[in-house]
Image (cartoon, helix red, strand yellow):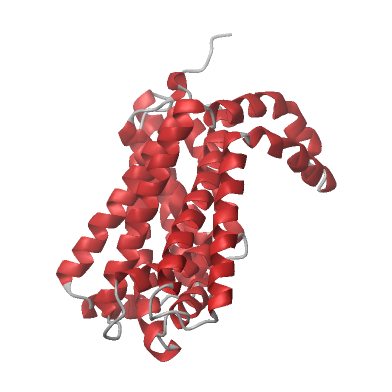
Amino acid sequence: MSESPRPAPGGQRWVRFALSTALGLALVAALFWFGGVDANELGRTLARLDPLVFLGALALHSAIYIARAERFRVLLPEQHRPPRASLLAVTSAHNLAVYVLPAKTGEATLPLYLGRTCGVPAAESIASLVVSRLFDLAALCACMAVVTLALCLGAHWEGPLALGYAAVAAFAAGAAVFLALAARGDVLIAPLQKFLGMLGLGARIEKHAGSLKVALRTAGHGRVRGAALALSFVVWLLIFAFYGVLAQGFGLPDGVGFLHASFGSSVAVLMNLLPINSFAGFGTQEAGWVLGFRWVGVPAEISLPGGVGVHLVQLFDTVLFGVVGHVLMGLARRK
């Protein structure tokens, strides 16, 4: 019996393009539907912002995506490193899923996207993701320790000084812990196996535990670790610049400068990094924004409108990059 002819590669490519684009649009639709986002309000908020400020923030956001993609690439073994353009498309689509889905469940899309689009094995993809997130936490804690100390020594810290210095110590300790875990991410496998075992999923990770341990050791080792850590600080400096430019663009009281905006926005970022964030970060990001700016002397009635505006600009950028990423993934040749 003769085999039935296979679909032409070109046809398969356009089917993947249609499916990937549809998935990206579905995520955007879910964001507007379940997140209660008003498209008209989004447009009005963007219209209030100086176009040059918006374009500057968009350029900074683009640089953040490029630096993050490069960090993922550095953490992958050389034989599995995809072209930079392909990886940027994947990480842009992945970031849309992370942003839209609650409790960080969108993180699971990275191994799926990297495997299907770039042919990267699951163990290496997961290791790159885990170590990059640990470096994120280490760099964020280190930056917050420095910023908090600077504010405690200045005139704009509104909380008790003892609390400020305690926060400095806690952030410094957190940076050290997360850096150590990034260097030896394989020690996380055992507790992860135990946790998944309680959910009845232990056998699944047991099958890949050995290769995942090796991948985690490789991703957090030596020169790779140094390059990834340096890129992590670049990422977070760009993030603070992005939030600072927008916060000042939407208006802050006199005397509240970039350092204060960095601290206020960092609390909002910390809220979104934790696996407690709501759908698209709505509510949790604003709560962190108000709390952070309150500690530097900006009342909620002033900080909250700007925080919502910043969130909407971030939403616009994330949707734009994510949809473009899905389109490019759909057009890419399957590895």
Determine the residue located farthest toward the front in the rendered image.
153
Quarter holding residue 51: bottom left
Left or right placement of residue 257 versus residue 98 in this view: left
Q: Nearer the viewer, residue 75 or 253?
A: 253
Quarter of the picture containing the N terminus is top right
Q: Is residue 115 above or below residue 236?
A: above
Quadrant of residue 173 in the image? bottom right
* Residue name at image x 49 percent, y 64 percent: 30
Residue 109 image point, x, y percent: 53, 44
Does the rendering let one see residue 117? no
Residue 127 spot, x, y in % from top left: 57, 34
Between 178 and 300, the residue placed more toward the observer is 178
Q: Is residue 309 visible?
A: yes
Query: Residue 271's spot in the image, x, y percent?
Result: 54, 66
Q: Position of residue 141 (x, y in %)?
A: 51, 56
Image quadrant assignment for residue 274: bottom right
